[in-house]
Image (cartoon, rainbow, N blue to C red):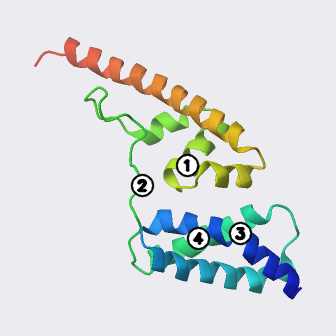
Amino acid sequence: MAAGLEELFRAHWPLVHAYLTRRTGDVSLAEELAQETFYRATRAFLGWRGGSAVAWLLTIARHVLIDEVRRGRRLVPLPESLIDPSGPGVALEVEPLLQRLPEQQRRLLRLVYVYGYSHAEVAALTGTTEGAVKTGIWRSREAFRRLYHQESEQMADGERESPS
């Protein structure tokens, strides 16, 4: 068991630490959280059913982050919009537009833009390749962008039709 834990630690420490560093913006805090992640993984190791070690560890790391937020520590803010700020000046709610996307596209966009996972981490979580994730993200963003432009055009047309 000790050899398996040590291999797990050596193989995945850089990925877990990098994820936590991106989310916290603080290398020393990320190191502390990574240690907590591996501590929790050690405690849960006997109950682990196999599968993707990276997905399992990143899930634990995400829960460690959630606990940090609950304690009141602030994380690096993630973008609140999937929209290019140089686009139309119409402010739209993102969530209703996301709900109009297919489930797989919604999930990819949330993993990257809401939860802050890298493409490599999303690949590990979803059991696909990094290339497939990049393609999926690109397609999802394009679908979202089309919905956004349709919605903003409808809002702009509505403003032109209504008397001031």
**Is residue 18 positioned above or below 152 on the image?**
below
One can see residue 141 in this view: yes
Q: Distance between the residues labelled 4 and 3?
A: 9 Å
**Where does residue 76 sit, x and y in percent of width and height?**
40, 63
Identified by mark 3, the residue type is His
Q: Name the residue under label 3.
A: 12
Q: Which tag, 2 or 3, sits closer to the chain's start?
A: 3
Identified by mark 4, the residue type is His
Q: Distance between the residues labelled 4 and 1?
A: 17 Å
**Quick one: label 3, few (<14), some, or many (20+) residues within 10 Å?**
some
Q: Which tag, 4 or 2, sits closer to the chain's start?
A: 4
Q: Mark 4 points at which residue?
A: 17
Q: Are marks 2 and 3 in contact (CB under 8 Å)?
A: no
Q: Name the residue under label 1.
A: 112
Along the line of sight, the residue nearer the viewer: 52 or 93: 52
User: Of helix, strand and loop, which one carries label 2?
Assistant: loop
User: Of helix, strand and loop, which one carries label 3?
Assistant: helix
Point out the image quarter for the N terminus.
Answer: bottom right
Identified by mark 1, the residue type is Val
**Is residue 67 positioned above or below 18 on the image?**
below
The residue sitting at 53% across, 83% down in the picture is 32
Along the line of sight, the residue nearer the viewer: 109 or 158: 109
The number of numbered discs placed on residues in the rendered structure image is 4
Q: Nearer the viewer, mark 4 or mark 2?
A: 4
Q: Which tag, 2 or 1, sits closer to the chain's start?
A: 2
Q: Name the residue under label 2.
A: 78
Q: Distance between the residues labelled 4 and 2?
A: 18 Å
State left or right for residue 80 relative to residue 90.
right
